[in-house]
Image (cartoon, helix red, strand yellow):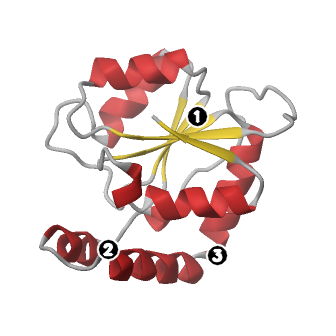
């Protein structure tokens, strides 16, 4: 994980059951995503796309970082928590969703430090995992949610 320092913009202290939010921006405007960040009191956004690039205006890493920073929200990109391009394309071409999720679980097992940092980061701040796919159940955020639930987090898909 690159440049991941939990709580850079402050933390709210321990919670009985911390929430982690996830959001896919597909079909949404930047203003809607920023509104959701504001409405849910998000302190840090973790971009879990393999490549933090988008053809959709405002959703590339530099633009997101600038806009979120202006709101007092930290932006971090974690390529290690992203889903590999080949897996995404296989699924988009009609491949098995079970095979997709299994491949992503294998990827996570190859990056245990990134998973450990994700859990530490989620404990330290009110955070949101950001990706393209709107439906979390069809996205690798589903597996990240499973991991976080195993560590006691309540995961809410927006």
Please name the residue shown 28% across and 76% down the image: 87
Please name the residue shown 76% across and 45% down the image: 123
Q: Are marks 1 and 3 in contact (CB under 8 Å)?
A: no
**Mark sitting earlier along the chain (3/2):** 2
Q: Nearer the viewer, mark 3 or mark 2?
A: 2
Residue carrying label 3: 112
Q: Secondary structure at mark 3?
A: helix
Image quarter of residue 130: top left
Q: Secondary structure at mark 2?
A: helix
Q: Are marks 3 and 2 in contact (CB under 8 Å)?
A: no
Please name the residue shown 46% across and 16% down the image: 70
Is there any visible trace of residue 45 in the rendered image? yes
Q: Are marks 2 and 1 in contact (CB under 8 Å)?
A: no
Residue carrying label 1: 44
- Image height of 127 relative to 85, above or below: above
- Image height of 88 relative to 102, above or below: above
Using the image, tell me which numbered label, if any, was put on residue 1.
Answer: none
**Mark sitting earlier along the chain (1/3):** 1
Marks 2 and 1 sit apart, C-alpha to C-alpha, by: 29 Å
Work out which quarter of the rendered image holds the C terminus and state it. top left
Horizontal side of 134 relative to 93 (left or right) equals right
Work out which quarter of the rendered image holds the N terminus and state it. bottom right
Task: Using the image as rendered, state which of residue 27 and residue 84 is in the foreground.
Answer: 27
Residue carrying label 2: 97
Image quarter of residue 56: top left
Q: What x and y, as percent, mark residue 15? A: 84, 34
Is there any visible trace of residue 1 in the rendered image? no
Q: Nearer the viewer, mark 2 or mark 1?
A: 2
């Amino acid at each position: 994980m690159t440049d991941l320092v939990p709580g850079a913009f402050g933390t709210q202290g321990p919670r009985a059951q911390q929430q982690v939010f996830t959001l896919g921006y597909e079909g949404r405007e930047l203003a809607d995503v920023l509104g959701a960040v504001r409405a849910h009191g998000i302190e840090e956004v973790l971009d879990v796309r393999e490549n933090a690039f988008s053809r959709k205006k405002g959703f590339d890493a530099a633009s997101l970082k600038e806009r979120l920073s202006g709101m007092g929200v930290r932006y971090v990109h974690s390529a290690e928590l992203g889903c590999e391009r080949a897996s995404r394309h296989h699924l988009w071409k009609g491949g098995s969703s079970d095979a997709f999720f299994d491949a992503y679980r294998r990827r996570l097992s190859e990056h245990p430090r990134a998973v450990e940092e994700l859990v530490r980061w989620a404990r330290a701040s009110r955070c949101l995992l950001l990706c393209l796919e709107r439906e979390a159940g069809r996205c690798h955020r589903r597996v990240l949610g499973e991991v976080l639930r195993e560590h006691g987090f309540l995961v809410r898909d927006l």
